[in-house]
């Protein structure tokens, strides 16, 4: 894609830190996540004129529907795509916290629905999702705090 934003050539502090804290069996690298976000931002820029509406996205029938909780708007994706360095790190973390918060919203909505998540497998899955998302939000919040402290220096 010719207009896709290019990820930072040098790994960010977040990328270096994530690599140090990742379990040895983890094959996911923050660099590939950052690259995927940058590519997605570029794709969103191209798609935004055809699928976004003032209050969400279109479904397959072309009808407007609200975005899922935690999804970044096309404007937020464009700001992320244009950012570099510490500003990219901050926007990326804020966006991911929002995204993980959306998962928590969906879990809450499911659990608040009478009769939902009654099967033990579904309840266990939903419980795991909630615990994992909260842990990731806490971790990313700590990283945001570190970025803010670094900026104050």
Image (spheres, rainbow, N blue to C red):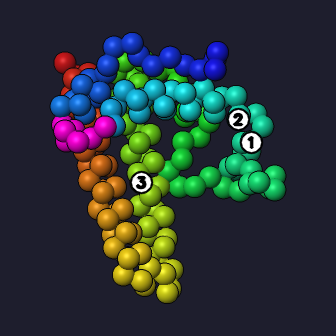
Task: Locate residue 51, reporting x and y percent.
Answer: 74, 42
Q: Name the residue under label 1.
A: 51
Quick check: can you spot residue 70? yes
Distance (Cα) linking label 2 and label 3? 23 Å
Residue located farthest toward the right when viewing the structure as drawn: 62
Distance (Cα) linking label 1 and label 3? 24 Å
Magenta segment boundaries in residue numbering: 21-27
Image point (63%, 30%), residue name = 43
In the image, residue 11 above or below residue 91: above
Task: Locate residue 73, reporting x and y percent.
Answer: 59, 40
Q: In this view, does 152 lie to the left or right of 94?
A: left
Q: Mark 2 points at which residue?
A: 48
For marks 1 and 3 on the same chain, the one whose residue lies earlier in the sequence: 1
Task: Locate residue 29, reporting x and y percent.
Answer: 33, 32
Q: Is residue 3 left or right of residue 6?
A: right
> For residue 141: magenta?
no
Image point (62%, 52%), residue name = 67
Q: Are marks 1 and 2 in contact (CB under 8 Å)?
A: yes
- Number of numbered discs on residues: 3
Q: In which quarter of the image is residue 95?
A: top left
Q: How crowded is mark 2: few (under 14 residues within 10 Å), some or many (20 or more)?
A: some
Mark identifier at residue 101? 3
């Amino acid at each position: 894609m010719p207009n896709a934003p290019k990820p930072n050539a040098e790994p960010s502090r977040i990328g270096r830190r994530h690599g140090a804290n990742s379990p040895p069996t983890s094959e996911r690298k923050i660099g590939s996540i950052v690259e995927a976000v940058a590519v997605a931002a570029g794709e969103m820029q191209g798609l935004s004129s055809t699928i976004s509406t003032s209050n969400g996205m279109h479904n397959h029938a072309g009808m407007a529907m609200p975005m899922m909780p935690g999804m970044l708007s096309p404007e937020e994706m464009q700001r992320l795509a244009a950012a570099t360095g510490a500003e990219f790190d901050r926007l990326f973390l804020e966006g991911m916290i929002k995204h993980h918060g959306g998962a928590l919203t969906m879990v809450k909505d499911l659990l608040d629905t009478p009769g939902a998540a009654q099967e033990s497998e579904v309840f266990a899955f939903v419980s795991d999702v909630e615990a994992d998302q909260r842990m990731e939000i806490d971790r990313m919040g700590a990283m945001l705090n570190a970025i803010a402290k670094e900026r104050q220096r």
